């Protein structure tokens, strides 16, 4: 960017760019960075009257941010979306405070809207196994059936995030001790047990995996490059639609099912927290509510006094 373009962009736009670069250095996911970038562009647009540069960062006060927030409500955005946009703005102002650009993080003074308490929809064990069995027996004629089966077995058998699965490298697999080393949010590493069926499917795929020099990724696309999160999601949706008739199933559906089914079978909540790589137990506790909801549904259906 030239000096003239920098002046036209304004100080806030330049600091926003620096903030996003810091997020990337700290290991934030590309999805988070893209979402925050879009949210902050929207803020810059709100703060920029026609043909004028945005105000200097220190000139942005609580009243101005409340006007921006009111506009989000007028646009009838959901509370979850508004919370994310506010998180992006708070992160930016925390960065500006650390850099000495502003003296107060005024974004922290904006009240956070309450998000509705929603429970994730969870496949039953029967639904999950029916889908995996359909993948296993090759109901669909696909060019890489062993790879596709391994993807499904690891998603359900290990409860990993789709980004963790896409980022898995060959040296992350301990085939002797049956462990996976996965890198979660913020590049935090954890070990995840590799159960028998997942290990079998993975061994079968690795035996057929093309040898591609300088490509450490476990899962490859048809070009021999690392399979992306979008690619994995597309594979899951294809099978779910054609085998189960449910296009709403996505990779994270198996993570929900993994946690819920472990809990239903008596696994300790803190152990599940470690397996999932949750920083807070409260994040894991939502699966308790899912299990209680399922239990009440069984009671209402089966108990004579229900």
Image: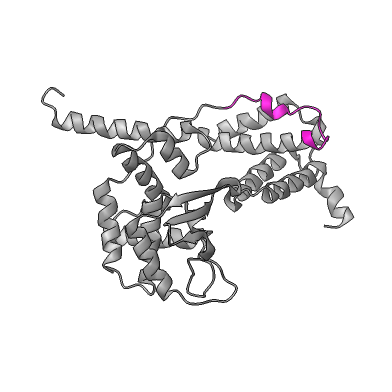
Say if the magenta span includes residue 98: yes
Residue 160 lies, in percent from the top left, at 45, 51
- Residue 241, by quadrant, is bottom left
| Image position of 305 (left or right of 5) | left
Give the residue drawn at x 38%, y 39%.
120
Residue 66 lies, in percent from the top left, at 66, 27
Quadrant showing the C terminus? top left
Work out whether 100 lies above or below 157: above
**Quick check: can you spot residue 237?**
no
Q: Main secondary structure of the magenta part?
A: loop
**Quick check: can you spot residue 68?**
yes
Say if the magenta span includes residue 299: no
Q: Nearer the viewer, residue 273 or 35?
A: 273
Give the residue drawn at x 75%, y 48%.
17
User: Residue lying farthest right?
Assistant: 3
User: Residue lying farthest left?
Assistant: 304
What segment is highlighted magenta in the picture? 97-112
| Coloring applied to the structure | one colour
Q: Nearer the viewer, residue 295 or 63?
A: 295
Give the residue drawn at x 40%, y 63%.
235
- Residue 205, by quadrant, is bottom left
Residue 178 lies, in percent from the top left, at 41, 57
């Amino acid at each position: 960017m030239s000096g003239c373009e920098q002046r036209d962009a304004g100080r806030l736009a330049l600091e926003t760019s620096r903030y996003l670069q810091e997020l990337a250095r700290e290991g934030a996911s590309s999805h988070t960075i893209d979402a925050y970038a879009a949210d902050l562009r929207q803020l810059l647009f709100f703060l920029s009257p026609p043909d004028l540069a945005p105000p200097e960062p220190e000139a942005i006060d609580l009243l101005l941010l409340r006007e921006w927030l009111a506009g989000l409500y007028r646009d009838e955005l959901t509370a979850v979306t508004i919370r994310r946009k506010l998180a992006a703005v708070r992160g930016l102002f925390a960065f500006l405070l650390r850099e000495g650009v502003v003296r107060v993080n005024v974004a922290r003074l904006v009240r956070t809207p309450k998000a509705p308490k929603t429970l994730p929809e969870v496949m039953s064990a029967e639904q999950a196994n029916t889908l995996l069995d359909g993948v296993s027996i090759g109901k669909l004629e696909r060019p890489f059936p062993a790879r596709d089966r391994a993807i499904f077995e690891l998603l359900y058998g290990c409860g990993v995030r789709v980004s963790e699965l896409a980022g898995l490298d060959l040296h992350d697999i301990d085939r002797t001790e049956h462990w996976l080393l996965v890198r979660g949010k913020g590049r935090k590493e954890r070990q995840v047990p590799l159960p028998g069926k997942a290990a079998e499917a993975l061994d079968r795929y690795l035996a057929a995996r093309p040898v591609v020099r300088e490509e450490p990724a476990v899962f490859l696309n048809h070009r021999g490059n690392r399979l992306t999160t979008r690619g994995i999601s597309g594979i899951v949706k294809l099978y779910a639609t054609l085998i189960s008739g449910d296009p709403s199933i996505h990779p994270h559906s198996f993570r929900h099912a993994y946690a819920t089914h472990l809990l239903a079978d008596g696994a300790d909540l803190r152990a599940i927290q470690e397996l999932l790589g949750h920083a807070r137990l409260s994040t894991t506790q939502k699966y308790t509510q899912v299990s209680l909801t399922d239990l009440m549904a069984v009671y209402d259906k089966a108990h004579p006094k229900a």
